[in-house]
Structure formats: structure tokens, C-alpha cells
Image: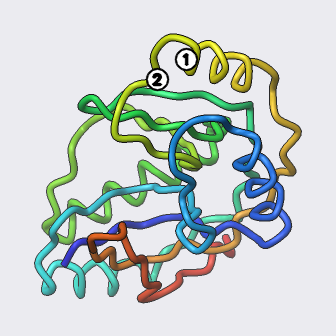
Amino acid sequence: MRAFLALPIPDETVDALLRLQSAIPFGKPVPEENLHLTLAFLDDAPEDALEDLHDLLTGLRWPPVEIRFTGLDSFTEMERGLIFAAVDRSDALQGLHDRLASLCRSAGLDLPRRRFRPHVTLMRANRRPEGRTRDRLAAALGPVADLPGFTARAVTLYRSTLTPRGALHEALASYPLTG
């Protein structure tokens, strides 16, 4: 099953992200219901490993984490463009990410060992921006967005199903961050 662990985003912050999306002159908006902050992408994970992970996550002890946005940014992934709201990689958030990665490995899931770059994807495009589009996009990305931060109080395990219209995310379980 294609799955990932993420922080759900509260409605007030989602509303601000949607307003920001509407001002970005490039790409296709990520649907409101798909806005999240990924902590660990599990790819196509065996269901028995996900069950083991669920058991481990039910014992997770971690305090709530303050999430602060640092602005807008973009990167290119295999010739595709992504525009995202960058998130401060605080010690608390990095620690939560590392703890979840450790639990995933304990459940038998092999995660790629790449640098954690916390963000909320806002727009996707099938090509890189070029010329005037790139210039307009650079102007839109320049100022730091005034996005309200939030306190993450739970980690959610999502199933992700790919369809011709895009990915559909379904929350499977939620694990409170209570310390």
C-alpha cells in the first residue's frame, strides 16, 4: 500500500495556504484535502509492515511541535516543478522526523536516507518554468509569505492512491503528540 506519515494542517492555516495558492502564477494547485506536511514517505509498503508500524506508533511519546512557515520556495523534481510553503526545520520537528524514521525502520520499512526538507506542496507542474513564467514565479516567490503557524498535535498515517486525476489521500490512523 502506498502510504506516508504526515502532520495534518488546521483549517485556519489551510485557508491561508489556499489564498496563497491563488496568487501563484504557475502550475496546478494541490487540492485542499491533500495539503499536509510529510514526515516520512513510505512508498509501496507491505501491509504487515504498516501494521507493525501502527503498533509502534500507538506507543509514540512526543510533545506537540510548533510549525512555523519561512516563506515560499520551489524545486524541480525529475523535470517537474513543485512550489511549496517552506517550514522551519526546528530541532523539535527534526527530532520528530528522526524518531518516526527510526520507528519505520524498526517496522521493517526501508526509508531513503535523504535530508529532511519540511514543506507543504502548494502547486505542481509537468514542466519547469521558463522565460516570462519563470520571472513572474520568481517575483511571487520572493516575499516571505505571512502564513500563520500552528501547533502540530498529531501525526497521521495516510494511504495514497494514484488516479488519473491525481493522488487521493485517506487518513488511516492518527497518533496524538502529547509528550
Give the Cα separation between the discs numbered 2 and 1: 5 Å
| Residue depicted at x 32% and y 58% | 41
Please state the horizontal and vertical placement of residue 64, each as a whole percent of the image. Answer: 71, 64
Considering the image in quadrants, where does the N terminus appear? bottom left
Q: Earlier in the sequence, mark 2 or mark 1?
A: 2
| Residue depicted at x 76% and y 70% | 10
Relative to the observer, which residue lies in front, 131 or 16? 131
Considering only vertical position in the picture, is 47 above or below 120?
A: below
Task: Using a 10 Å C-alpha cutoff, classify the residue at mark 2 as few (fewer than 14 neighbours), some (14 to 19) or many (20 or more).
Answer: some
| Residue depicted at x 42% and y 41% | 125
Please state the horizontal and vertical placement of residue 89, each as a whole percent of the image. Answer: 61, 36
Residue that numbered label 1 is attached to: 134
> Residue 75 is drawn in which quadrant?
top left
Relative to the observer, which residue lies in front, 71 or 140? 140
- Residue type at numbered disc 2: Pro
Considering only vertical position in the picture, is 15 above or below 148?
A: below
Considering the image in quadrants, where does the C terminus appear? bottom right
> Residue 141 is drawn in which quadrant?
top right
Please state the horizontal and vertical placement of residue 139, each as a whole percent of the image. Answer: 73, 17
Point out which mark residue 129 bears: 2
User: How has the structure been colored for display?
Assistant: rainbow
